[in-house]
Image: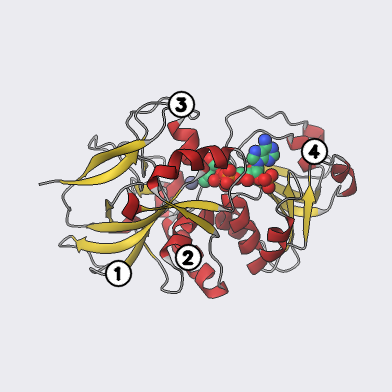
Amino acid sequence: MTTTVRAWAAPAAGAPLEATTIVRRDLRPDDIRIQIAYAGICHSDIHTVRGEWGAKTYPITPGHEIAGTVVEVGSAVSKFKVGDRAGVGCMVDSCGECEACVDGEEQYCTGHLTWTYASEYPDGEITQGGYSQEIVVTERFALRIPESIPFENAAPLLCAGVTTYSPLEHWGIGPGSKVAVVGLGGLGHMGVQIAHAMGAEVTVLSQTTSKAADSTKFGAVAHVATADRAVFRELRESFDFILNTVSAGINLGDYLGLLRRNGAMVNVGMPTDSLPVKLPTLIGRRRSLSGSNIGGIAQTQRMLDFCAEHGIAAQVEVISADRINEAYDRVVNSDVRYRFVIDTATL
Ligand code: NAP
Ligand code: ZN
């Protein structure tokens, strides 16, 4: 017998989200059932439900920043017991056999990767995400949430946290690294805190100065407003690493010029526009331009433990479900400090 739970969903591309119910499967031997306490609103939810990332099957219940309590475990579950704190991020299943999966980088699975919502399991089940009371997921894709991080501040770590932690770890950021984070939103504010905790010197490149005090609070040494074009001249060849979290297209050439010799610009923000690059900008200083997709499951656990150890987490604004549509508009207008999190008791 399946379970019907309350949820919020987008009925069609671009339509406002509304209250509904969804069905969760019965537990398989390796599944756990999590009673969701809070679900973060990621800009990816908005890109997806508004149809900006291509056609999807509606209705869609978004949400891949999920934190809550285990309320039931399958017969073969070994990692969790009832009452444990648990989280789910962007993925709920992968093939487990391809080179990426074997390397623990399930996010690059070339077999069958199942995203937390608007995606399909190999058996045809369409996934529905965290704006709901409960989720059923294999324990392999569930994370342990450290006791010291409240659920509402932990939920955004499951996407925004790991998406910024992963490239910083992969590119070996640490003491001596000069890092710029572009865009101080959900991802950006985690990127600044994590890079700072790793020992880097961090500068925030934001559209305006309105978030400058927060940049300092998150550990940045400087907050620079890119609306003033002079900064692209003044900061030329200043950084070893630029993490671009912007949800819209930006002029990559402007930012690549800020990299020192051998510097790397890594894009995690995912607008769909094609962004032109002049190759001599890369060639002249052996700069590289790259991208990075969330993080693997083991890495996500490392990130959660790292955040707990360093006393960092997401700064959130908790909202009731009836404010989801308003929150979407505010996120698109860069008016979020710094993650909206839905209290699932209000669904
Ligand atoms: P967000 O909270 O909306 O933050 C994006 C920030 O970008 C804004 O706060 C703003 O910062 C800046 N920005 C927005 N529009 C801009 C523009 N036109 N020009 C310059 N800067 C602009 O979004 P998010 O949830 O952090 O997500 C950011 C992007 O990452 C989205 O595209 C999302 O889909 C993507 N994402 C990718 C992955 C991945 O695995 N690669 C994972 C999660 C999300 P300022 O106010 O400081 O300028
Ligand atoms: Zn996300």
Asked whether the beta carbons under mark 3 and mark 2 sit within 8 Å of each other, the answer is no
Classify mark 1: residues with Cα within 10 Å, few (<14), some (14-19) or many (20+).
some
Q: Earlier in the sequence, mark 1 or mark 3?
A: 3
Q: Whole-percent x and y of residue 66?
A: 39, 54
Tell me, yes or no, if residue 213 can be seen here: yes
SS at circle 3: loop
Residue at the spot 24% in from the left edge and 67% down from the top edge: 78
Cα separation, mark 2 vs mark 1, equals 15 Å
- The label shown at residue 54 is 3
Q: Earlier in the sequence, mark 4 or mark 3?
A: 3
Residue that mark 1 sits on: 84
Classify mark 2: residues with Cα within 10 Å, few (<14), some (14-19) or many (20+).
many
Residue that mark 2 sits on: 304
Q: Is residue 171 left or right of residue 228?
A: left
Residue closest to the eye, 102 or 82 = 82
Residue closest to the eye, 126 or 2 = 2
Residue that mark 4 sits on: 254
Amino acid type of the residue that numbered disc 2 sits on in the rendered structure = Leu
Task: Give the label, 2 or 1, closer to the camera.
Answer: 1
SS at circle 1: loop
Tell me, yes or no, if residue 267 can be seen here: no
Amino acid type of the residue that numbered disc 4 sits on in the rendered structure = Asp
